[in-house]
Image: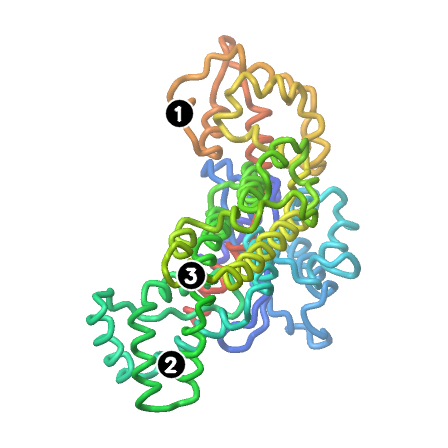
Amino acid sequence: MANYESNKLHQKLRENKFSIIVNETTDIDTTKSCGIVVRFYDPETKQIQSRLLQLANIFADKSTTGATGERLHKIITQCLETHNIPKENVIGFASDGASNITGKYNSLTSRLNNEMPGITILKCVCHSVHLCSSQASKFLPRRCEDLIRNIYSHFSHSAKRMHLFKEFQEFCDVKPHKMLHVCQTRWLSYHAAVERLLEQWEPLKLYFINCSAEDRLHSTISILDTMNDPSMKLYYTFLNFILPKFNHLNLLFQQQEPTIQVLHKKCHDLYTDLLRCLFKRDEINMANDIASLDLDNEALYLPVNQMYLGSDMHSLLQSEEYRHRKELTGNVFRRCRQFIIIACKEIKKRFPLGNNEFEMLRIFVPKFFLDERSRISMPTLRDLVNAFPRITVNPQHLDDEWRAVENAEIPEEIKIISNPEKFFTALSTLRDDFNQPMFEIFSKYALEVLSLPTSNVDVERLFSKVNLLK
């Protein structure tokens, strides 16, 4: 069965354009593996699919020194050659931002660029979002991270402590939820933990007051001292407001549906949303290119007391505990402002905010595709064709079908489809009065572009399954 399915996949890759998604891992039995997943539009199933091509042991070659760019390139090249899959069919590549894979020199992608000129290289959006928030978090006190970890460690292996804590939860009329663990390599996992910490703040404080008085353990006293710092609750309230913005983008690009058509817009929306928290509105509105705003120009900032850090933060600052602590709240606001500025700088560095070609990909959003104004703003798609040279198409034929949409009678049942994959699949079936396909070229081109991956989440799902099986 495995051979049958593998051979069927290899045949499809010989006939269709596809992208490669790569990641490496050391699994549960310490085997260092490289997962190669291919993503392509399958005309047989009429779906964009992600399929495992190979799970290779990096140290199968005894002479190798590890997961170097040279070794990973050799694994991919041998895999394609062994199964007679033409390299001309490879149109895209996605992975995380590790230096051995995406470094400028002597990496896997530098070799792919030399061997397959014009290949579209995309760094995983989810990893990039994580790095944006992770870099920004360095400007908040380290104790914010330590407190969450210490509280979880305190309860993690003690049924007695959990039982005692439930008494304080009942006393404060708070739901008996457990404290959450945070992942060492995924800073965005902190949002769930921060949200839970704020929910349990009062029973936790009472619990650690009791523990400090009875046990006198250094760890419990340290936790209580941190919770007694009035600035800590302000920082967690800010994080509870700001982290969902990053998490929303992260979750969006973990979907298996095509997402490249909204990459520019969603990154631009996040960037604009963050700027509005601390920049003067007039400066944002007057900017021809929002990515060109000088993030270090303090003259563009709102006064500290006019910054927007969330509704809960505003409410907290009106309370008796914080109303008259101007110096403390001012220091917290300055740190939070720095968090947002660094996050914006990282977004500018990692995402294509000023890339016109990625902005043009919105034509693959069905609503925009059908809007006649889109052909006014983009009369020709030549620049888009040039941006993805390995997806071969006649530019004039593509333009002809693009401009013919205005005069075409597209059935309502197709117009209401919002999923671009299903929309262009349905569009490809339309025929004119002479039984000739109306949008065959455009639909084929759209589905190949939409198959370009924006994250390597498919490989990470694969690794999870392998670990579970082992």
Number of the label disc, if any, that sits on residue 154? 2
Establish if 262 lies above or below 111: above
- Give the number of the mark in front: 1 or 2: 2
Q: Which of 269 and 432 is in front in this view?
A: 269
Q: How far apart are marks 2 and 3 (CA)?
A: 29 Å
Query: What is the crowding at mark 3: few (fewer than 14 residues within 10 Å), some, or many (at least 20)?
Result: some
- Going from the N terminus, do you reach mark 1 or mark 2 first? 2
Query: What is the crowding at mark 2: few (fewer than 14 residues within 10 Å), some, or many (at least 20)?
Result: some
Q: Distance between the residues labelled 3 and 1?
A: 51 Å
In the rendered image, the quadrant that contains the N terminus is bottom left
Q: How far apart are marks 1 and 2 (CA)?
A: 53 Å
Q: What element carries label 2?
A: helix
Which amino acid, by three-letter code, is at mark 1?
Ile
Query: x, y (%) of residue 174?
Result: 24, 65
Residue 111 visible to an observer of this rendering = yes
Query: x, y (%) of residue 410?
Result: 45, 16
- Going from the N terminus, do you reach mark 2 or mark 3 first? 2
Q: Which residue is drawn at 45% across and 32% down?
A: 422
Residue marked by disc 3: 322
Residue marked by disc 1: 416
Q: Residue at x 57, y 31 (%)?
A: 362
Q: What element carries label 3?
A: loop
Total marks in image: 3
Query: x, y (%) of residue 450?
Result: 56, 38
Which amino acid, by three-letter code, is at mark 3?
Tyr
- Left or right: where does residue 431 sit relative to residue 172? right
Confirm or deny contact between disc 2 and disc 3 (CB under 8 A): no
Which amino acid, by three-letter code, is at mark 2?
His
Q: Residue at x 62, y 45 (%)?
A: 301
- Going from the N terminus, do you reach mark 3 or mark 1 first? 3
